[in-house]
Amino acid sequence: MGSLRQTGDGRLPSLGEIGLNQFAPYLINRLSASYNAHLQDVLKSNGMTTAKMRALSILTISPSLTVNELAYLAVVEQSTMSRTLDALEGQGYVRRQSRSDDMRVRELYITDLGRAAFAESWPLLYSLYADLFEGVDAEEYDRFIDTMHKVLRNMHRRLEGDTTADEVPAD
């Protein structure tokens, strides 16, 4: 939108003119930081970390990912994800298996024990999610999700240097 890029006289608005409470990147960061801090506290009582829960969550719906793919989807540094997976493997929650067509590539799978651990934490996760959107009706939620996908596509294009990309990487 051109209106976000400059004022009526053609100059860029200052952050003071926009205001922090109207500057979406600031609000996204505040929301993310607050949610993650609260999530970390809640998960700690279950002996779980945010990175572990993200890995288990994703592997319940997307098995056979590589460490790099899982780190990308979990929004965790690859080195952190590797350490997290070592711990999860030690707990018996995940297993690594070499890909049949390329033995150098190891895929990750959640075990039954890992599924049970995730299932135990899911009510807490869902409750946090529901609390986030209390008072937001279905139409508002749908518009919010649509907008977030548009913003993610824009970010993906920007990061990839591609102004024609149509898709955000699969969730």
Image (cartoon, rainbow, N blue to C red):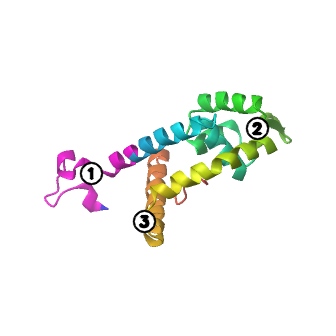
Q: Is residue 7 magenta?
A: yes
For this rendering, which residue is in front, 39 or 75? 39
Q: Nearer the viewer, mark 3 or mark 1?
A: 3
- On the rendered structure, is 97 left or right of 36? right
Q: Quadrant of residue 29?
A: top left
What residue did someone put label 3 on?
A: 136
Q: Mark 1, residues whose alpha carbon is within 10 Å: few (<14), some, or many (≥20)?
A: few
Residue at x 53% of width, y 37% of height: 40
Q: Amino acid at mark 2?
A: Val
Q: Is residue 65 magenta?
A: no
For this rendering, which residue is in front, 123 or 37? 123
Q: Amino acid at mark 3?
A: Val
- Kindly identify which numbered label has been placed on residue 56: none
Q: Is residue 62 visible?
A: no
Magenta residues? 2-30
Residue at x 77% of width, y 36% of height: 105
Q: Earlier in the sequence, mark 3 or mark 2?
A: 2
Q: Residue furthest front?
A: 45
Q: Amino acid at mark 1?
A: Asn
What residue did someone put label 2 on?
A: 94
Q: Earlier in the sequence, mark 3 or mark 1?
A: 1
For the stretch drawn in magenta, what is the main secondary structure? helix
Disc 1 is placed on an element classified as helix
Q: Is residue 123 above or below residue 98?
A: below
- Kindly identify which numbered label has been placed on residue 21: 1
Q: In x, y percent, where is residue 34?
A: 42, 42
Distance from disc 3 to disc 1, alpha carbons, whole Å, reads 19 Å
